[in-house]
Image (cartoon, rainbow, N blue to C red):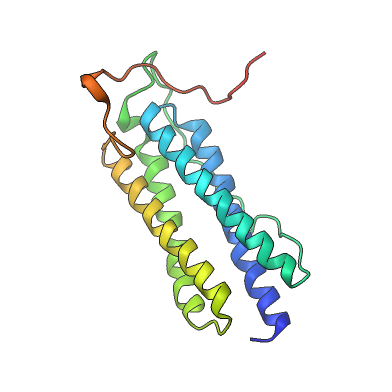
């Protein structure tokens, strides 16, 4: 793979990844269910690590980080009650995120396997593997599983929800 091909390849992957991160950030603002929102926070944290890796790889070939390849809209969510914890309210958003991640993996897995640059191929395989893991988390959340990142101790009931913005003035 020549340098200009590597630059174009990494830029295209990064642009798709940026679009997914932006979509997941928007999804986190829409999903008030506490456990599902924690899943978004976990996924976004890992995706920010992926973006750091991609930014570093692009810098090595003197290429700037691209903007998002596209804007992925969040499906509408019905207004939650005071509890904000009805899992079914967020099914559409969660299923949509799982679909986007599946499409990302399906698009890039065969292309990454054909890469000749071993270090970047390995890095991208980790990104794809974790993306498949995130897809499974969103599928499980869409199915109503609430203990995605661990079980509550002492049988404490879930209550309340997450606000769409962290700081309110």
Q: Which residue shows up at 50% across the image and 35% down it?
A: 28
How many dots with numbers? 0
Question: Where the N terminus falls, by quadrant?
Answer: bottom right
Residue 53 vs residue 75, the one in the foreground: 53
Residue 47 picture location, percent across and down: 53, 51
Q: Residue at x 32, y 25 (%)?
A: 86
- Which quarter of the picture shows residue 34? top left
Q: Quadrant of residue 101?
A: bottom left
Horizontal and vertical percent for residue 59? 74, 65
Q: Residue furthest left?
A: 155
Judged left or right of residue 15, residue 32 is left
Q: Is residue 65 above or below residue 22?
A: below
Q: Considering the image in quadrants, where does the C terminus appear? A: top right
Query: What residue sits 61% from the left and 50% below the top?
Result: 71
Determine whether, in the image, residue 90 is placed left or right of residue 162.
left
- The relative height of residue 66 versus residue 147 in the rendered view (above or below) is below
> Residue 97 placed where, x, y %?
43, 48
Q: Position of residue 100 (x, y in %)?
A: 45, 55
Residue lying at 50% horizontally and 72% vertically, measured from the top left? 122
Image position of 4 with respect to 62: above or below: below
Location of residue 59 with respect to 48 vertically, above or below: below
């Amino acid at each position: 793979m020549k340098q200009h091909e590597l630059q174009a390849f990494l830029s295209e992957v990064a642009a798709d990844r940026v679009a997914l991160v932006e979509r997941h950030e928007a999804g986190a603002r829409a999903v008030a269910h506490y456990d599902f929102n924690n899943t978004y926070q976990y996924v976004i944290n890992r995706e920010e690590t992926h973006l750091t890796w991609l930014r570093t790889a692009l810098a090595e070939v003197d290429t700037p980080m691209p903007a998002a390849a596209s804007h992925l809209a969040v499906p509408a969510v019905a207004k939650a009650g005071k509890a904000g914890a009805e899992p079914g309210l967020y099914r559409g958003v969660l299923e949509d995120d799982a679909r986007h991640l599946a499409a990302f993996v399906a698009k890039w897995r065969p292309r990454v396997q054909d890469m000749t640059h071993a270090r970047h191929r390995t890095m991208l395989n980790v990104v794809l593997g974790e993306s498949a893991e995130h897809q499974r988390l969103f599928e499980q959340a869409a199915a109503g599983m609430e203990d995605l990142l661990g079980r509550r101790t002492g049988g404490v009931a879930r209550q309340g929800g997450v606000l769409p913005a962290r700081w309110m003035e």
